[in-house]
Image: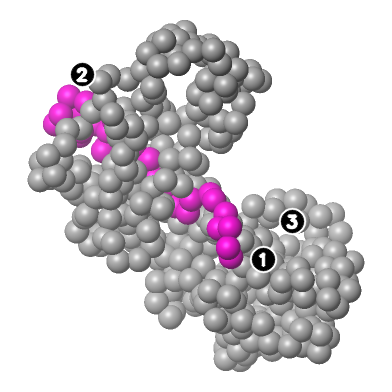
Amino acid sequence: MTRNVGTVSRGIRCPIIRKGDDLAGIVVNSVLTAAETDNFEIRDRDIIAITESVVARSQGNYISVNDIADDVRKKLGGETVGVIFPILSRNRFAICLKGIAMGCKKIVLMLSYPRDEVGNQLLTEDQLDDKNINPYSTVLTLKEYRELFGENKHPFTGVDYVQYYSDLITETGCEVEVIFANHAVEILKYTNNVINCDIHTRKRNKRILKEAGANVYSMDDLNTEPINGSGYNSKYGLLGSNKATEHSVKLFPRDCTYIIEDVQRQILEKTGKHVEVMVYGDGAFKDPVGQIWELADPVVSPAATKGLQGTPNELKLKYLADNDFAGLSGAELKKAIEDRIRSKDQNLVGKMESEGTTPRQLTDLIGSLCDLTSGSGDKGTPVVLVQGYFDNYTAE
């Protein structure tokens, strides 16, 4: 029988996860219960995706602002520290900044402008054009910034992040000086001790600063080991962390391969079906209105089973219909396209017939789908079941 539905993404409701819970068992039970109550079947190559948040929570991977302060003080000396290129986020960075400030006497806060790394705006490009400011050659002090542009609130959150971050720092008893620049080495005019807080450009900026003689640590260098029994992340440090309380953050999960393999094994035992499993964080996509690039995590997926490695190997149906089979229609066109799909090369890289297909890793594509499905609010679906993702036009 012909199937008339392709990919389906379902948010799966689960209990609230706490430290020490059997996450793999909860995930498997929740998926199978949903299949029974909503009358669908688990199939081979279905994908079960688990949000990183509940993985980290089950691991108890939390740290306090005091833990952050201790590590900052130990690694950077506790005096004047340059904090450069942080993203503008109450959830992602503010509590980390509070901990950093508690470990310093003074912070020189250097903000990229007009936007942060993931697209949150301090200013618009039109504002810069109006004042004839080139952000790649002009360094602004806080006084100059205010005189030129006044108060600027984030279009979605309504927060003036310049003031918010400044107040957050001074409330800890730490002095603050704010500058605006887009070249990492500008911070060295103020201090040699630096924390570069950028995410996806961190390795380059860290290299540039080190070559210039700085004592520099990236966010993934902080809290990589336990402090007084705290959580930690040996690979990503503070990167990918989220606010838990006003005094603590939840870190990105540590090694979680054991969880995805356990879920895969249990599903096989209970259903006879071989599913793929992954852990996902932020998706990788750009908002066309706010210009925010969602990916504030260091990676979309910190762990995935082997069947999710690689990139799609797909033909572009529009290309085939408009070029190779332009003279066909109806059943004849359908058969020609199906035959081409069945005989396609196993590697379509560089082939015109795959032009326009999305050249991204499977885990990035699927993680983005899952992030949009589960949302970040009160849906209560930290697990997503994706079915039919690997099907194509020929699937029955």
Whole-number angstrom distance, CA of label 3 to CA of label 2:
57 Å
Amino acid beneath label 2: Met
Which residue is label 3 attached to?
206
Ranked by sequence position, the earlier of labels 1 and 2 is 2
Residue 164 visible in the snapshot: yes
Residue 107 to residue 353: above or below: below
Find residue 17 and report its horizontal and vertical position in percent: 25, 60
Density class for disc 1 (Cα within 10 Å; few <14, some 14-19, many ≥20) is many
Identify which amino acid the numbered label 1 is placed on.
Asp
Q: Residue sitting at 17 percent across and 33 percent down?
A: 41
Q: Is residue 76 visible?
A: no
Colour scheme: one colour
**Alpha-carbon span between mark 1 and mark 2:** 51 Å
In this view, the mark in front (3 or 1): 1
Q: Residue 282 magenta-drawn?
A: yes
Placement of the N terminus among the 4 image quadrants: top left
**Of residues 112 and 185, the one drawn nearer to the viewer in this rendering:** 112
Residue bearing the label numbered 2: 1
Q: Amino acid at mark 3?
A: Lys
Residue sitting at x 54%, y 12%: 327
List x then y, in percent, for residue 357.
56, 30
Secondary structure at badge 1 equals: loop
Label 2 neighbour load within 10 Å: few <14, some 14-19, many 20+: few
Mark 3 element type:
helix
In the image, 87 versus 168, the foreground residue is 87
Badge 3 vs badge 2, beta-carbon distance below 8 Å: no
Disc 1 designates what residue?
A: 116
